[in-house]
Amino acid sequence: MRKLSTKIAILLFAILITIIAAISTLIFLINSEKLTHFIEHRIKADTNFDIRIKDTHLNIFSCLQLKQISVKWLGEQKQFTLECNTIALHYNLFDLLKRRIKGIDISDVQIILNAEMETAINSPSSHDYGLKPFSLKDIYPEHLLVENISVNNTQVKITAGDYLFELTEMDLQVKGIQPATPFYILMSGKFSVSNPSKETSSNLYGEIDITTKYSLPDDELTILNSSHFLVNDSEKFLLNGKALSILTSPEIHCNISGTHHLEAFNSMIPENYKDWSLNGSISTDTSIDYTAKNQSWTMTAITDMSLSKLGFASPDYDYFAEKISGHIKINLNTDSNSRILSFRTNGILEPFLIQLGDFTTNMRNRKTHFSLNGNYDTQNKNLNEVNSTLSWDNLGTITTIGDILSITDNPHLDMNIELKKIDNSAFFETFAKDTVEYSNPVLFNTQIEGESSSHFYISSAKKHLTINGHLNVNNLNLKYGDISIDDASIDLPISLAYPRSKTVIQKRDIPDSQYGAVQFKKLSYGPLKIENIRINPIITSNNFFIKDPFKIPIFDGTIDIRNVSVENAINSDRKFNLGFQVNNISLEALTTTYNLTPFKGILNSSVMSFRGQGQTLYSNDEMKIKLFGGEITLRDLSINNFLNPMTEIGFSAEVNHLDLGEMSDTYREWGNITGIINGNIQDFKIVAGEPSSFEIEMKTETYPGTKQIVSTKFLKNFVPGIGKVLDKVGFTNYKYAVMGLHARLENDYVKLRGAVREDGKELFMKGAGMKRLEIVLPNVDRRVPFKTFLNSFKGILGSDIDDTQVQFK
């Protein structure tokens, strides 16, 4: 019996020695870091991770401690780094035998993830890191209780594109971890989102406070309703939801909601707009669903957004908006296979007030309806299958369908834009009337009716833009000031290219079937009325053409318009061509229409061709006006800067055999004069409606059978300062040998010379007969202000009436 006891004692001692030796060996291997190096080598060989542990210490009775742990992802690019100062496992040896751990403390953790934008969208799965999915409940020791896990002072940096997302001062507390009972996980800390490339301070910052409950048997994480995060220390977002099968085939369903005031988001405004004011509030309710299975995943996010009295304003109030309210719904969907982000957006805005520079509108009590749908290719940076609509109550709809390729680098546009049933009156009232209320009162009071529809195809690539389509307007009625158009219609084909068209098209090459049509029943301009006009225009390859010659019936005659073209219309080197012929225009009908003193005459011309380039039009042809028994020939016609208010009109003219008797019969209030006058007008220029230069030479000439007599009334009307002298003499009429002048306008002054130079004097009129009356210009070097000269020729002799010289011989 004693021998048996001895043997048992020896056996127990041997077992104890073996256990002590094994524990001592384990402690040696751990504390000498040999076991650590072996584990590091195996992990590196079997996975894509490089793990380094600088120091390991094991106290068999109370603690296992790891220091300065580093984990790196070994891919083609360095994307993931985890560094930790200390991991400590605290236990009591006897409690450990009962499967009970006092706590796990992790401190000073830093995680860095560098990712491109598409990497951020298609986040790495466990497969990407060389890990196989597993269930925590399958590996967690049965009946093991971990009293507490704490992770303190954690910092996370995630770089995606130009943006940096940071979590700082993060603390994590987990208490009472055991398989049978759900346990709580509490996380708190701070976050920020910034753009380091712009060297600005944080655009967005805040705090996170999340409470969750985890069930180990169900592998289910519940985000409790008390969870939230604060943005900019004031805007609170509530967070709740569930996450299932986190480490196998995760499913995440969560909701984020809150009401936010725009003033709190001033830090997100770009630097150039920091001094702009924001007001109003936005309520959001976002649900996110994420499902992963068989190494692939899908994600859907739906946001309901309510806007309440949003507004903004620039410091000078040139740009502002007020009372923007409405509802917007945004649906986003993506998955790991297609790398496509699909979006569906629709919304409605209540009437609001907005001013953008000169543009102003209060939407005239009309609601705005809009939608925007499409797919974003995160790899190729393309927007595909874009489909948008924009409409307003009782106004019309604008739709856009197409693709935008390479949106971040040299965008390629391939879009169809359609305007459907745009009510011209409603469109003008909504988007134009408020803008011109004070700057253009005439336009503000404009009345417009009818309906417009248009369809355009827009394509752009490598800084080249093309637009092709049709503009259609039906039942157009317009009243603008003295201009009115009744019952007009427009069908205009349009083909434009920017900056220049690569296709050269001549007018003769365009088939008749490609031209459009513009027609109106009646055009009125004051008392002038023109009826039943039809033209056939087209805009093609930046050129504007009108197909056929067309006639404008006017003043008992016609104006024939032909050869109308504008080449390179949108470029500065545009070229103009215009031809017209005036046929039998009645000057009597013209003067009667405009309530002028009627006189007889016929206006005719040969075909006059205008050509031009840039902002200049000119013609080498002539126009003849038959008037007062003679003829006026206009030539050297030109128009400069005709696309701006300082338009300049130039011409020269020849006056041939005008009968002054017929003229005075027409304008009897002037007084009587008989004779024949000839003359020339050279380089007559009118700028902005005012003459700027001319040289005029007019002189009467003697013809057999034509008397040269002028009445006292005529002289008193046109020559100031001689009325009293003529009244004293008492003659009613005077004979003259010659009458006329030579006038030159330069720099707003007129220099005058007489028709006859005699004895060193310039005579405006040289008398004839027994009692000869002669009128002398007072000073050959005298310059007269043009406005004085223009006042019905009063002031020919200057404003100093005493200088007027009248001499009788």
Image (cartoon, rainbow, N blue to C red):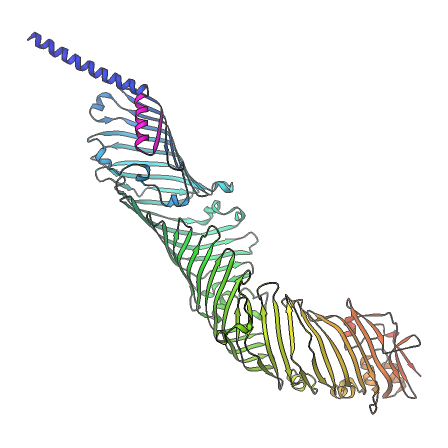
In the rendering, at what x and y percent does residue 395 appear? 44, 68
Q: Does the segment drawn in magenta span residue 250?
A: no
- Residue 777, visible in the rendered structure: yes
Numbered label tally: 0
From the image, which quarter does the C terminus lie in?
bottom right
- Residue lying furthest bottom in this view? 705
Read off the magenta span. Answer: 34-54
The image quadrant that residue 479 belongs to is bottom right
In the rendering, at what x and y percent does residue 718 appear? 81, 80
Residue 664 lies left or right of residue 494; in this view the side is: right
Viewer-side residue, 323 vs 4: 4
Q: In this view, does 80 lie above or below 608?
A: above
Measuring 32% from the left and 27% from the top, which residue is drawn there?
41
- Residue 60, visible in the rendered structure: no
Residue 461 lies left or right of residue 34; in this view the side is: right
The image quadrant that residue 241 belongs to is top left
